[in-house]
């Protein structure tokens, strides 16, 4: 779950990381009232799930009420890389002496946490990594051991920040690490982490991604669900409780299990087609789930053929077959279906489908031949 900047800052604040006083709103006059409360100069910042807002005109300094109103008016409704700004965050502006970069994420191949710190902040870290990789100090942290203050100090020294920033940076990075681990985040990033002329270190931006699988330990994370970026199809699928990711091809895909769903996308590509979506119906291949999945796929106007790829385990073949037939009776489909049914009780399932086969419902013996058929029907 990706948080907006202001949500990320509220998350940071809970762990004692210094952030600027501010408030979020979707209304111009309310933005002006917030600016008046926190005091000028203020920064008006677009709240969208994409970086580079500054360059796109989504971050503006205002010295007085008239400027705050002007920036709020211009930024609300702005299109930043396809994301329309509905919310702005207004905070008291900070004086900046230097801009740094700091983050924690998981290094899967090293099976350890990875911290990155750079004296070259403010710009995208990918650019620093490409043009000046030595400017990024990295630290691997063993999850079983955690981050000691000693190791943190050595890491900060390696990043060659201004010596004035050392104490503040160590303090914030220790807290950022705690936020990352205890908050069950996949990513915490501060860019820029600033050194003020007064010597304080402070988080000026926040990028936080929380692990949705840890929701059971953090019921309050449910509040972030409403602001997740989803296209219309993903919104509809999410409402039905389906694991769906929208893609831009023409073959609608339904599979049971995330692994099989991903393999299905690969096979569709392999035979020259392009998948319209990822959709994992999990173990629930009953008529309700199948009808919901078919509805979501049918509403996607790019879809020209549907590939249902089921390998029964706990899910039984006859259940899937009955689910498909019943769902087809409920949903008026614009595209033909190709089914591949294997695994537990596949024989029984195929026997149920056989008398119903037509040019709207086809069955193939293998995953590869079914993919090829679906791609052919989609006109690729
Ligand atoms: P991003 O472009 O989406 O990463 O948005 P940021 O929050 O990182 O802001 C972009 C840039 O705006 C920062 O790198 C700063 O240079 C500038 N900026 C943001 N907030 C302030 C502030 O309080 N004071 C000053 N002087 N500049 C700011
Ligand atoms: Mn930033």
Image: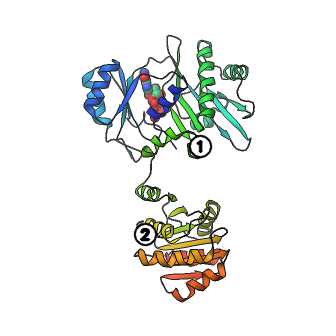
Is the residue marked by circle 1 packed among few (<14), some (14-19), or many (20+) residues within 10 Å? few
The x and y percentages for residue 161 are 62, 19
Query: Callout 1: helix, strand or loop?
Result: helix
In front of the other: 79 or 257: 257
Image coords of residue 50 (percent x, y):
46, 41
Residue 187 shown left or right of residue 57 in the figure: right
Q: Residue at x 43, y 44 (%)?
A: 227
Q: Position of residue 290 (x, y in %)?
A: 50, 69
For the question of whether residue 273 can be seen, the reply is: yes
Report the Cα–Cα distance between label 1 and label 2: 32 Å
Quadrant in which ligand 1 is drawn: top left
Q: Please report the residue visible at 44 percent of the width from the left and 22 percent of the height from the top.
A: 20
Which residue is label 1 attached to?
214
Residue 239 drawn above or below residue 72: below
Residue 271 in view, yes or no? no
Which residue is at 66% across, 21% downward? 156
């Amino acid at each position: 779950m990706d948080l907006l900047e202001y949500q990320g800052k509220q998350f940071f604040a809970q762990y004692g990381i210094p952030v600027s006083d501010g408030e979020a709103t979707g209304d111009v006059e309310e933005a002006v009232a917030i600016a008046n409360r926190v005091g000028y100069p203020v920064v008006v910042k677009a709240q969208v799930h994409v970086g580079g807002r500054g360059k796109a005109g989504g971050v503006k300094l205002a010295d007085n009420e008239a400027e705050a109103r002007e920036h709020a008016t211009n930024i609300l409704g702005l299109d930043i890389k396809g994301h329309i700004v509905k919310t702005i965050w207004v905070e008291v502006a900070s004086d900046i002496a230097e801009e740094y970069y700091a983050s924690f994420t998981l290094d899967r191949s090293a099976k350890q946490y990875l911290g990155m710190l750079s004296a070259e902040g403010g710009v995208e870290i990918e650019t620093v990594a490409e043009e000046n990789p030595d400017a990024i100090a990295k630290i691997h942290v063993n999850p079983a051991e955690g981050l000691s203050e000693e190791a943190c100090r050595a890491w900060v020294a390696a990043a060659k920040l201004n010596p004035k920033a050392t104490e503040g940076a160590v303090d914030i990075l220790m807290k950022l690490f705690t936020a990352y681990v205890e908050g069950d985040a996949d990513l915490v990033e501060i860019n820029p982490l600033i050194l003020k002329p007064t010597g304080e270190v402070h988080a000026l931006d926040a990028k936080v991604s929380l692990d949705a699988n840890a929701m059971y330990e953090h019921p309050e994370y449910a509040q972030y669900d409403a602001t997740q970026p989803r296209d219309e199809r993903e919104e509809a699928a999410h409402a039905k409780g389906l694991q769906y990711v929208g893609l831009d091809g023409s073959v609608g895909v339904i599979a049971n299990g995330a692994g099989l769903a991903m393999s299905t996308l690969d096979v569709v590509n392999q035979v020259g087609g392009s998948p319209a979506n990822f959709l994992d119906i999990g173990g629930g291949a009953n008529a309700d789930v199948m009808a919901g999945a078919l509805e979501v796929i049918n509403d996607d106007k790019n879809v020209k053929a549907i590939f249902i790829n089921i390998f029964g385990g706990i899910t039984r073949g006859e259940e899937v077959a009955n689910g498909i037939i019943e769902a087809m009776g409920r949903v008026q489909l614009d595209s033909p279906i190709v089914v591949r049914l294997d695994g537990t009780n596949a024989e029984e399932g195929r026997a149920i489908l056989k008398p119903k086969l037509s040019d709207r419902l086809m069955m193939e013996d293998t995953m590869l031949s079914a993919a090829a058929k679906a791609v052919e029907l989609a006109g690729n």
